[in-house]
Amino acid sequence: MPKINRLLMTGAAGTIGQQIRAGLTDFAAHVRLSDIADIGVAKPPEEFVACDLTDPEAVRDMVRECDAILHFGGISTENRADLIHRVNIDGTYHLYEAARKEGARRILFASSNHVIGFHHRETRLTASSAIRPDSNYGVSKAYGEALARMYWDKYGIETLILRIGSCFPRPKDRRMMATWMSAADLLRLIGVMLECPRLGCPIVYGVSDNEECWWDNGETAYLGWKPQDSSAQFAHLFADDPAPDPNDPAVVYQGGGFARAGHYED
């Protein structure tokens, strides 16, 4: 595929950003990396722009001259509602407003399986399944999905809404055998997102071709993304784990531990 001119990735210092960073130069002549944390040395064609997502003017400067955006920035786990709101909700709004004003027309929004975390594991979900957030974090991602849809309908800004299961070098526990997505499969999806002639605003479950899977991407098959990796290669890591309690909310619900009773407190 021909390269775009400038691709922006927020959250470049995060777990996902570190895994896919090197592969982004296949897609763009210039790769703009952003975070509030240290990303190390940016080497051409990389460039670094430090940016706090809560600062709308800084966000607009970060987005300027970018053709497409990979939005992985923000708080990536459960936290106090006020912090989640300021960074994940206000910050995502600032990003979309900057994209509208600066002419960026295609975005990958890193949503999460915690948008649908209160569905039972035995329920196979599609892009049309009802949202059932399991946490403050899940609610913030549901907001981002709704915002992306509105900016598509009103302003024509296309977004691939990616409901990430878990994207680590390898699954960290037995649950992640079902939710794991490899960095290589994510990079393949980014290539599809940038290359396809019409993206729209699809919801895609970010998961590899695992033997156990709770999510069906059939509604977005028009994109042509076919994950090639599987968590099966890591099954031996959990072969001796004790059987989980089937009545534990972390086992009953797709959101795992996020679905347990209680509210986050400082």
Image (cartoon, grey):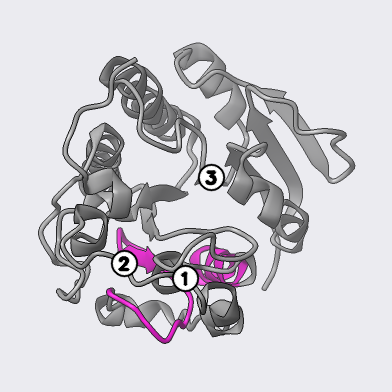
**Going from the N terminus, do you reach mark 3 or mark 2 first?**
3
Instruction: Specify start and end residues of the magenta stretch as a single range.
Output: 185-214
Look at the numbered discs 1 and 2 and tell me whether their residues touch, using CB distance below 8 Å.
Answer: yes
The residue to which callout 2 is attached is: 244
Asked where in the image residue 43 lies, by quadrant, the reply is top right
Task: Decide if residue 255 is on the left or right side of residue 189.
Answer: left
Q: What is the crowding at mark 1: few (fewer than 14 residues within 10 Å), some, or many (at least 20)?
A: few
The residue to which callout 3 is attached is: 69
Asked where in the image residue 48 lies, by quadrant, the reply is top right
Q: Is residue 151 magenta?
A: no
Which is more toward the observer, 125 or 102?
125
Is there any visible trace of residue 230 in the rendered image? no
Residue 49, horizontal then vertical, whole percent: 70, 25
Residue 47, horizontal then vertical, whole percent: 79, 35
Marks 3/2: CA–CA distance = 40 Å
Task: Decide if residue 240 is on the left or right side of residue 219.
Answer: right
**Going from the N terminus, do you reach mark 3 or mark 1 first?**
3
Look at the numbered discs 3 and 1 and tell me whether their residues touch, using CB distance below 8 Å.
Answer: no
Q: Is residue 153 above or below residue 58?
A: below
Under mark 3, the amino acid is Ile
Asked where in the image residue 242 lies, by quadrant, the reply is bottom left
The residue to which callout 1 is attached is: 241
Under mark 1, the amino acid is Asp
Q: Residue at x 65, y 31 (%)?
A: 34
Q: Residue at x 41, y 48 (%)?
A: 109
Disc 2 secondary structure class: loop
Disc 3 secondary structure class: strand
